[in-house]
Amino acid sequence: MASQSEFPSRRPLWSTYWCQTPRLPCLLLFFGFLLVGGLFLHVYGPVAVNLEWSADRTYQYTNSHLYPRVTRAPCNATCRWLREQQRRKQRVSSTCNSYRNSSTADLSYTLTSKLLKTMKHFLVLDSHKLIYCYIPKVGCTNWKRIFLVLSGAMDHTNMTTQYETHLSAQKNIRTLAEYSLEEAKQRLANYTKFMFARHPFERLLSGYRDKFLMDYPSSTIFRKNYGPKISSYGDPRQRRPTLRSDGTLNVSFAQFAQYLADPANKFRGNDPTEHWNEMYRMCHPCAVTYDILGNFSTLHEDADFFLHLQGLDGKVSYPKSTNPTNSSDEQYLAKYFAKLLPADIEALLARYSVDFELFGYTAPSSVQTILQGRSNLPRWADVA
């Protein structure tokens, strides 16, 4: 049997070969390591705890603030969504700053009494501390349905038609413009604010197909009021006005595009031209700091995450579209924009340039093909 002296003696950690004498300084060194380690765990320990907590729930969210350590987390679906939200907000902020001293864009940076009177697209739900700025042709009908359910004016989101939804929203949901300046500022500072954007070309194509190709009563009324003016655009040699079965004028997409591109035509947020009014003119993202910036291309994902973060996913869900125009389909875009002259497309890019930059859009691939080789195109159009 081996003697006890053949085994190394079990010495304390501090009495290793490099720290055998003197012992007191080594003890101080050892406890110094413990202190530093404790501080490290105090600072970084919550990260590991939070990661475990967020695996089966979600990241802590408060009005306009994300949990400060979310960027340390291994990126699951919630983390990726929050990071995309941060990217969108940074894009809006940097674009607003770049235009601050420019006279090329009519951007608002401060809430004033004059601006507040125009903010009729801001729907306010005091009961849930929500403010939603709606943009036509960006899924706004369903958000109005959700607000009506949350307000108690409706029991389910599938109870009304599109037309009835808009009328009910006007009757039951207040807009920010109805509040005093101080009341509006208080709500903007404390409520959760959100909006949804859409590619400008998809949105104007959706507006064209909805108002000039569909046979809804509201579309017929629109054609009667705006058809004659819009049909006056285009090459006079090719202009042959024809009538639809309801007696209104047929309007080609080329005529519609030239009407939109004409800077003499001013669109407003409180009449039918809101369907192609610039998004920034309705929702003022340089004056209002949004907590959530949704995108039509990720509409249902954004809606699901938003409702979950607000604790509303057990009460409502975002419905399916009741009036799809398929205008986000690249084939539809290619089909319609192929009918336009490159100069008209350039004019549309110019008109909606601020929307393109604010929300990070570029020219669709089919449009890029048409514009290849053209000069004086904006850098963000991403055309080689």
Image: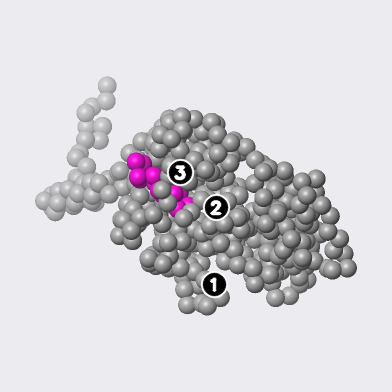
Amino acid at circle 2: Ile
> For mark 2, what is the residue?
135
Callout 1 crowding tier (Cα within 10 Å): few <14, some 14–19, many ≥20: few
- Compare residues 29 and 58 and report the one nearer the observer: 58
> For mark 3, what is the residue?
171
Callout 3 crowding tier (Cα within 10 Å): few <14, some 14–19, many ≥20: few
Q: Residue at x 25, y 35 (%)?
A: 8
Question: Measured from the top left, where is residue 97 in percent x and y?
Answer: 46, 70
Q: Specify whether residue 4 is in view.
A: yes
User: Does the residue at mark 3 contact the one at mark 1 (Cβ under 8 Å)?
Assistant: no
Q: Residue at x 30, y 43 (%)?
A: 46
Amino acid at circle 3: Lys
Circle 3 or circle 2, nearest the eye: 3
Please, what secondary structure does the residue beneath circle 3 have? Answer: helix
CA separation in Å, label 3 and label 1: 34 Å
Q: Answer with left or right where residue 77 lies relative to residue 382.
A: left
Write down the region rendered in magenta.
122-133
Q: Specify whether residue 292 is in view.
A: no
Q: How many marks?
A: 3
Amino acid at circle 1: Ala
Q: Residue at x 39, y 40 (%)?
A: 310
> For mark 1, what is the residue?
105
Q: Look at the image and tell me in which quarter the C terminus lies.
A: bottom right
The residue most toward the left is: 24
CA separation in Å, label 2 and label 1: 19 Å
